[in-house]
């Protein structure tokens, strides 16, 4: 690229929103990405790193030396630092800690001390606080003197002398009421509050349900420690959905599309290894019946149908249950009624589709007994799939594990091996 | 239940947020649900219907007569009506149209005329507009006289005499500036705007990227026609993620957990039917090689491994691509580099896992040639999976179809039939 073109590109980048620059970086192969990254003004590095996806952020950080990283980090405020910190080299993080004042160092340490999926890890400290005994007139004068009015502020937090939350004052009440009114007379005292140890996905659900823009975070003594904003919540919802989708397909983490082949292999190998083991088990189940297959070779052609349909049906059931658990609409309390329903669906589907398949098997191979075995095996495997589709997510949930992870593998493993066992077993008993 | 208990329950329900009542209704089996629904005060029916999931809303509407429905609908404003309208019986909708004034009828008709996945279908009309030549003092007086200050209002929309959008005035600027300032001097003129025909998922992505709370919707002449709010956008993100998850498992729509068995069978049958067809095709491929299987029965036990691992690997690849397309990070422009990478990953995985499996096959059956066939077939099927995992989503996207729907079925069908064909074909050529 010519030097002049680089200048034009640099000028264009300077005018873009940091999120747009991050997006461009994500869409570029590694070499081009690092070239563009070098063109970005150093004082924008911090905000762009924040916007980039985890995988791409790591490639950008790997390209920077300690000094550049420190300079970038120093442009960020404490909660932004907390987001970036896990990706920073240890020595940079340490230097950074030294450069902070006491309050911000304590905030950063406390933010880093909360597990990733809790409110404590996603809250920020851009809180505007007022007392309840002042008038709106005073509030307005105070706000106008603030060095920075934080984004997304739709309400002010009312605290007492000891930082204990008394209530919240929506901006619109400041606008709509007489300047002489006292804060305490018009603040709302029943606002939704969160605790740092609350789960962030629960908080996200509360934001959706009550249509919140910001909400205060308080400790067990109702002392105000931070706030959550709707933009963070949107990120949580999106990331959760993506994590579900990735884990569904057995990808360990988000992949940089232009990552090396070796990195991609590492990201995917665990799942393939698990599948290999379950496939080997299923293969050994078939191995038990090699004599039967040798005598009736049609069994080999028909058996994958029984296993496959069972797997699909089981995954339909478990997807429903996982979704219901995530929305909090079902619990192990409903186990009996859910089992009854799913067994009913499986029985109906088994007789229906098993009947169709039995007929096809009869027409293909001219054996009515083979057709009957096919229908019976389909029905039994669908019932097996239904029981596991209901039970596995409910049990995983009861054990405190995420039912979205691994359920699909387990169900497919059971319906594969189970399907082969049921079909070949029935055939051996009835047909031989 | 005793009458007294019902009174207590009714009292409790009256105190709950409509979203919480909807949540309780969703968690109850049909009989209990309708009993609780009857206890809810009639004047809250509308807002609770809005909060309920589609499947549950339908059961509640089915329980109401036209008069009750009309009464419920009349409590809602136009954009809420637009959300509810598709579920209402035709005659109720018609009566409703008559009961509206001209402006609201036109708004409702226009909202219903936009496709479900566009901005026009999700915008609301709770807009507060001002002129640019007035002072903040006048703005404040105007706001205090408003009958209702809409939720989520973080900015006012500045229009001229012809309703053309001139800019937006964030509430915080009203608070932070001197009351004598003119709106035109402090309004922001580079706000993100949407058009009614924009796709709602694109709008959602813009909300996330630019951290918006509300945004104006304008027609092609920049005439202000509505607004979008972040709570609607959160619903869109959540629904999109859920739709992906459901379509992944082949569920046609969201299921009411306590729906009848028959309804559930209908929701799931299409997918099972498709799977039946693809499984039958794979079965016929095996049928072609019955002679080979009769001679070497080990082939029957090993073939599902080749097919299964191929399917899983192909779904990993396609999940990545579908995600990249959804985020707008990749397009058919990247086809070549993505293909190269995925083929590299497949080759490496094929040699690695194919090698392991070949070794296991050799140990189990004592045939080095069988082990070699296993390894070669694994590698070839993983390459087939990689090509399809990249191409199918890209082609679907190019044809204007949603790549999340059906991709998984197609890939599994190809890797199943392809895996059987490759493995049994190679075995027939080399071993017999």
Image (cartoon, coloured by chain):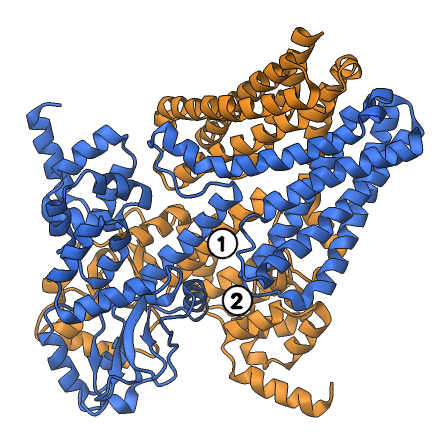
Chain colours: A orange, B blue
- Identify the image quadrant of residue A177: bottom left
Q: Residues within 10 Å of mark 1 (few under 14, many from 20)?
A: few
At a point 68% along the width and 29% down the height, the residue shown is: A278
Tell me if I can see residue A118 in this picture: yes
Q: Residues within 10 Å of mark 2 (few under 14, many from 20)?
A: some
Q: Is residue B202 above or below residue A279?
A: below
Query: Residue B321, position in %: x, y?
Result: 62, 56
Residue at mark 2 shares a chain with residue at mark 1: yes
Tell me if B368 is positioned left or right of B387 in this view.
right
Most foreground residue, A346 or B44: A346
Q: CA distance from mark 2 to mark 1?
A: 15 Å
Query: Residue B415, position in %: x, y?
Result: 71, 41
Tell me if I can see residue A218 in this picture: no
> Which label sits on residue A50?
2
Q: Is residue B334 above or below residue B40?
A: below
Q: Considering only order in the chain, which callout, 1 or 2, is on the residue closer to the N terminus?
A: 2
Q: Is residue A427 above or below residue B256?
A: above
- Identify the image quadrant of residue B261: top left
Tell me if A70 is positioned left or right of A146 in this view.
right
Q: Quadrant of the C terminus of chain A?
A: top right
Residue under numbered circle 1: A239
At a point 6% along the width and 27% down the height, the residue shown is: B4
Q: Is residue A46 above or below residue A116?
A: below
Q: Secondary structure at mark 1?
A: helix
Q: Nearer the viewer, mark 2 or mark 1?
A: 1
Name the chain under label 1: A
Most foreground residue, B394 or B137: B394
Name the chain under label 2: A
Query: Residue A171, position in %: x, y?
Result: 22, 70
Query: Residue B317, position in %: x, y?
Result: 66, 51
Q: Kindly check if marks 2 and 1 are in contact, taking CB atoms under 8 A apart as contact.
A: no
At a point 85% along the width and 26% down the height, the residue shown is: B292
């Amino acid at each position: 690229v010519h030097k002049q073109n680089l200048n034009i590109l640099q000028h264009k980048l300077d005018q873009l929103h940091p999120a747009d620059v991050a997006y461009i970086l994500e869409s570029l192969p590694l070499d081009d990405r690092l070239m563009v990254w070098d063109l970005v003004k150093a004082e924008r590095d911090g905000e762009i790193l924040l916007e980039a996806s985890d995988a791409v952020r790591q490639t950008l950080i790997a390209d920077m030396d300690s000094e550049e990283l420190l300079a970038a980090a120093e442009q960020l405020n404490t909660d932004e630092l907390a987001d970036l910190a896990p990706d920073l080299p240890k020595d940079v993080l340490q230097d950074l800690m030294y450069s902070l004042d006491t309050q911000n160092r304590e905030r950063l340490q406390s933010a880093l001390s909360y597990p990733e999926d809790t409110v404590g890890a996603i809250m920020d400290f851009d809180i505007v606080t007022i007392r309840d005994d002042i008038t709106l007139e005073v509030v307005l004068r105070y706000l106008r003197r603030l060095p920075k009015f934080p984004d997304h502020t739709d309400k002010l937090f009312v605290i007492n002398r000891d930082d204990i939350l008394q209530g919240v004052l929506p901006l619109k009440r400041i606008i709509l009421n007489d300047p002489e009114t006292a804060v305490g007379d018009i603040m709302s005292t029943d606002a939704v509050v969160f605790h740092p140890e609350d789960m962030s996905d629960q908080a996200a659900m509360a934001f959706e349900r009550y249509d919140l823009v910001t909400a205060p975070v308080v400790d067990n003594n109702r002392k105000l420690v931070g706030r959550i904003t709707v933009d963070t919540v949107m990120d949580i919802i999106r990331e959760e959905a993506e994590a579900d989708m990735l884990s569904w397909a057995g990808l360990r983490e988000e992949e940089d599309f232009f990552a090396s082949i070796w990195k991609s292999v590492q990201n995917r190998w665990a799942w393939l290894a698990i599948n290999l083991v379950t496939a080997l088990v299923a293969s050994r189940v078939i191995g038990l019946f090699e004599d039967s297959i040798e005598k009736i070779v049609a069994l080999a052609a028909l058996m994958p149908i029984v296993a496959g349909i069972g797997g699909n049906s089981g995954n339909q059931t478990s997807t429903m249950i996982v979704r219901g658990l995530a929305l909090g609409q079902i619990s192990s309390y409903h186990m009996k009624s859910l089992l009854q329903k799913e067994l009913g669906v499986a029985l109906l589907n088994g007789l229906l589709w098993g009947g169709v398949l039995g007929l096809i098997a009869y027409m293909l191979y001219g054996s009515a007994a083979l057709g009957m075995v096919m229908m019976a095996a389909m029905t039994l495997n669908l019932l097996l799939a239904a029981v596991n589709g209901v039970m596995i997510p409910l049990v995983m949930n009861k054990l405190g594990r995420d039912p979205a992870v691994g359920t699909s593998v387990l169900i497919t493993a059971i319906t594969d091996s189970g399907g082969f066992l049921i079909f070949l077993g029935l055939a051996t008993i009835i047909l031989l």
